[in-house]
Every structure is written in C-alpha cells, then in structure tokens.
Amino acid sequence: MSAVQVQRTNDNSSVSKASTTNAGYFDDRWISKFVVKTSKRSAIIHRGYYIRMLTIDYFLKTFLKEVGSEGQVLSLGAGFDSAFFRLKSSGLLKSRYIEVDFPEVVLQKINLISANQNLSVLIDQKTCLTDLNSKRPILRSLDYVLIGLNLEQVSELPALLLDCGVDLKKPTLILSECVLTYIVDRHSSDVILCMARTFQNAAFISYEQVCPGDGFGRVMLDHFTSIGSPLKCVTTYPSPQSQEARYLKLGWEVSTAKDMNYFYYALQTEEQRIAIGNLEMFDEYEGWHMKCCHYVLVSSFKGSLTALVDCFKISKSTQANILPNSHIAASPVVPLAIRNNKENQHLIQRFGHTSAQLPQTNDCRSNGSGRVLLYGGFGLSEKAVSHGRLDSLILVQFNVADGELITIIHKCQTNGDKPGKLMHASLAVSNDGFVLFGGRQSPSNPSNGVFSLKRLRDEEYKWISLKTGGASPIPRWRHTADVIRERNVMVVIGGKAANGECLNDAHQLNLTTLKWTKCVASGGHGLTGCHSHRSAVWKDCIAVYGGLDKNDIPTNRLYMLTILDDHHLELNEVKCHPSLPAS
C-alpha cells in the first residue's frame, strides 16, 4: 500500500474521530486541529470510533497512572492522533510520548503543529528540534518525539529512538491502531518481534480486525480492498485466539485479545451506556454487535509490565462476550437460483422487513414448496436506483426442482389504506388473511397502528386500517406479534419505544371485537424487557426466543407463553441442553 493510500486512511480516521467528538461521544478538542474539512458520520460510525477511542484512552490513562513519569508511550502508525495533546493539556502526561509513521504523514503533522500555536505551545520548546528531511523527518523534544519511518523498515527504529534520547529500559506502552493489518505478515511480525527485543519492560496494545470468514467479514474485506487499503493479515490471524498465539510466539510473555463488545460493557456503567444511546437516534443493533465482534484489542506484556494485566480489566470480567467469536464462523451457504426475470432479485434485498408464511396446501407439503410474504424494510427501490424505506409487498414462492431450491419472486399489487414505509413491523397470519402491527418510520416515530391484509386474487391484496378500542399498546418497533387462531387473538410482546425504552409488556387484541387488553404475566418468570426477539405459535402457545435485553445484550432465553384469559398469560422458561446460542 502506497503512502498516498495510507494518508487517505489517516485522513478518513481523523475526520471520523472529529465527527465522533463533535457529536458528544468523546471529549477531544484537539483532533479538530488536524482536520482540514469536517464531515458528519453516521451513528454506527460514531459508536465504533467512540468505543475505539474510549478503550485506547483507558489503556493510556491506566498505564500513566500505574507507571507515572517512569514510563513512556510509543505510538506506531500514529497518523494525526491527538492523544499527546489531550493528555498533556489535562496534566496527565508526565513522561515522553513518541510517534512513528510514514515520512509523508510525519512531515505534514510537523507542519500542522508548527502552524498552530495552541498545539506547539504544549511541546517543550526549550528542547524542541526539528529535521524536515523529506526522507526521515523528525521532531524531538524532552516530552514529544515524531519519527518519519516506514514500519516495513522497523529494524532501523531502535537506533532512531536512541538518537532521539529514548531510554529503551523504561517501561513502555506501545500502541498500534489498525496499523499492522495493512502490512504483510512478514513485516508486521517483524514489528512485533522488534518491539519485544527492543524493550525490556513493555505492553503492546494493538487494535485489529478479525473474523474475515463470515458474511460481515467478507463485506469488511471487500470494503478495505475497494478503497485501496486491503487487509493483509486478517486471514492469517483470523481470530482473537490466533492473535494471542502470534504475540506469544514473537517474544511476549502474556497476551490476551478481547473484542469491542467486551470493552463496551466492561468500561462503562449502565448509566453511561444509556447516555451514549441518547446522543443520536439509533437502530442498527445487529450491525453494531457484528462490527464489535470483528474488531479486537490485543494486549501483550513482558518484563515488569506483566504485573499490569490485572489493572487493565482484561484477565476476567463479570460480563461475558456478547457474541463469542467462536460462534462467528463461515456458515454453509445454499445458493438460491432466481427463476423469472433477474431484475426481481433486488426486491428481496432488504433488511428490517417483516414476513409471514402463507398457509400450506397439501400439494406444498408433499413437494417441499411454500410461499412467504415480505413487507417493508430498507433496501433498493423498485427501479433499483436508490436505497430507502420500502412499502412494497413481495410474494416469494419456494419450489424444489431436481434437488435445487428455486425462488420465484413477485411484486404484489396493493390498494386500500397502506401502512406506509415501515421498518421492524410485525406481520402475522390470521384466520382471514394477515394482520400488521407497529413498526417505525424513524426511531423517533414508531406506530401502533393495526392493519388487515386481505388477498383479493393471486398477486393482489388490499390493506384495511382497523379501528381498535381498549387500552392500545404504546407505539413500538422491534416487537413481535402472533395470532393464536383458535382464540382469534393477536399477542404483541416487547419492542422499542420512541424514547428508546426496551419494553417489557404484552398485549392482546381480540380480532373479533377489535378490543385491546394489557396482559399480566404469571408462572415461573415475569416478562423482562426485550426487543429484536423472535416468536412463533406452537399449538396454543407462543415460543419467544432470544433478542436483546434492556442493555442491548443478546440473550439465549427460550420462553413458552400460554394465554390464560383476556388479561393473563403464563410465561415459563424452557431449559435447553446444550444452551442455545445468543441471538
């Protein structure tokens, strides 16, 4: 990867950090000094950079607290990182801070610092010397050192550090944020080994990508390749365990790797997580958890700094991994051949939609075919020219022919009182068609509307807005709704409210009288807050599985819910052996 491409990743990272800071996630007034043009990032980008910045900041401050002026920090591939200025201005930095990056990046950073008095005043000017040699630019002072060096030439670094007066015997915290993954295995392993041999007492903190083999990982690989920054080590060291083994093999005495889900819960209280959640409207929980599963922080120690392992909350935690990385593996993929015109394929490329299976005929049961209705969600428009919320109703017919699963996709014609472009609604099969409840236009604009969907003919349906009475549920999304056809009632469970609350209620709608009642749970367990769960009717009960709890942590609980009368239900947990995966 060329220096120009590295510069681009540095610029993108700096803009994202500045946007995260401007949105109120992290306190860093210095990062904006290194950004020429700001750009607002999405909420999920903000969250990703927030937990990255929070975790690195935690390791820095813990190290400085434990070691004090006796230690030093070495940041590899630092780019335009502002940690030195943030820590120096707050009085937390009493030791030397060294940064290494490409000569082009370092030269630009030196010029930015020199041109900004607010930055340059924080450096010890009495001892500050600069060498603007384009091949090896260096800024050195008693408290801050910048060295221009391609890390593929890391063998030259120890001599450069000594020339700058760095004491290699001092306890040293080495940082590397998404750096080694851009370097081929041979050179990145040289960096890890060189650091182990150069410093007697050190901690190496590296932030890297993992798990390239699943769907999210493949998209991640394609993304970085498309922007000219391919990930060169992630397939060689694809798991937290392989990352740990790598460092142990290359001279480090202790090594542990935790994904960012771990740190999101280990480093924050519930109140802090709620405050972060309230900064922006957010409805990308699946993507958020997967993103955090694919980034790990590897912390490795040697010499006297092995004693710091317990100080960093990494040896144990009361909070287990949200989605254990052992579960993140490539799953067998069954390709679906698309019969009919291929332009229909984009009609099912969506997420946040709801679906319901049409009742099976005897013929369907015998030949393994079936039909599913899809409604709403977010995806490509009908003409496949833009992305957005959808209000289309799609019929997908599954057939088995010659041992191959074939799908035929139809766009249904609809009329009547359309519910609108909704995400995370619930469509349930009723005795005379389908019933749709809830959903949202935006996270701050959920619905509690009820709509009946009637089939007029093969691919034509009519929406009817139902006027209901009784105690209606508050507007919500990410809930479930199921119809118990023997009782002709729809049961709504949980979901998210407009204020972000995770709901722990259940409601019944009598589909004959169209009257709502709120249910009280009894039995082995009361209802707990959940959203994004799944449910299905089984005999005269409803099975409720998984979802996210009030802390947005995936659960693996399975409950059987039995309707006792209009106001009461019984909820009992089903114990499974082995345990079901969190979902």
Image: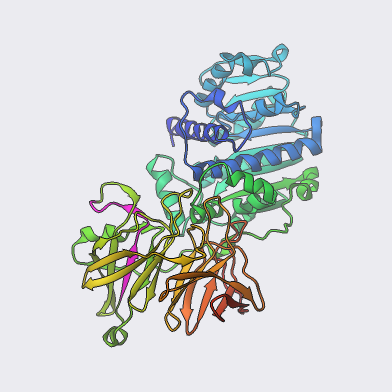
Using the rendered image of the protein, determine whether residue 136 is visible from the camera's viewpoint.
no
In this picture, is 376 found above or below 445? below
In this picture, is 125 found above or below 171? above
> On the rendered image, what quadrant is the N terminus found in?
top left
25 vs 15, left or right, is: right
328 vs 434, left or right, is: right
Which of 176 and 557 lies nearest the eye of the viewer? 557
- Where residue 405 sits, quadrant-wise, is bottom left
Position of residue 261 measured from the top left corner of the image (x, y, whole percent): 60, 53
Q: Is residue 375 magenta?
A: yes
> On the rendered image, what quadrant is the C terminus found in?
bottom right
Which of 578 and 332 lies nearest the eye of the viewer? 578
Which of 502 and 106 lies nearest the eye of the viewer? 502
Visual colour scheme: rainbow
70 vs 52, left or right, is: right
447 vs 171, left or right, is: left
Q: Residue at x 56, y 13 (%)?
A: 115
Position of residue 581 measured from the top left corner of the image (x, y, whole percent): 56, 69
Q: Main secondary structure of the magenta part?
A: strand
Magenta residues (range): 371-383
In this picture, is 281 found above or below 242? above
Using the rendered image of the protein, determine whether residue 154 is visible from the camera's viewpoint.
yes
- Where residue 21 sits, quadrant-wise, is top right
Q: Residue furthest top?
A: 126
Position of residue 426 measured from the top left corner of the image (x, y, whole percent): 42, 65
In this picture, is 420 found above or below 62? below
Number of labels in the image equals: 0
Position of residue 496 measured from the top left corner of the image (x, y, whole percent): 53, 57
Q: Is residue 207 magenta?
A: no
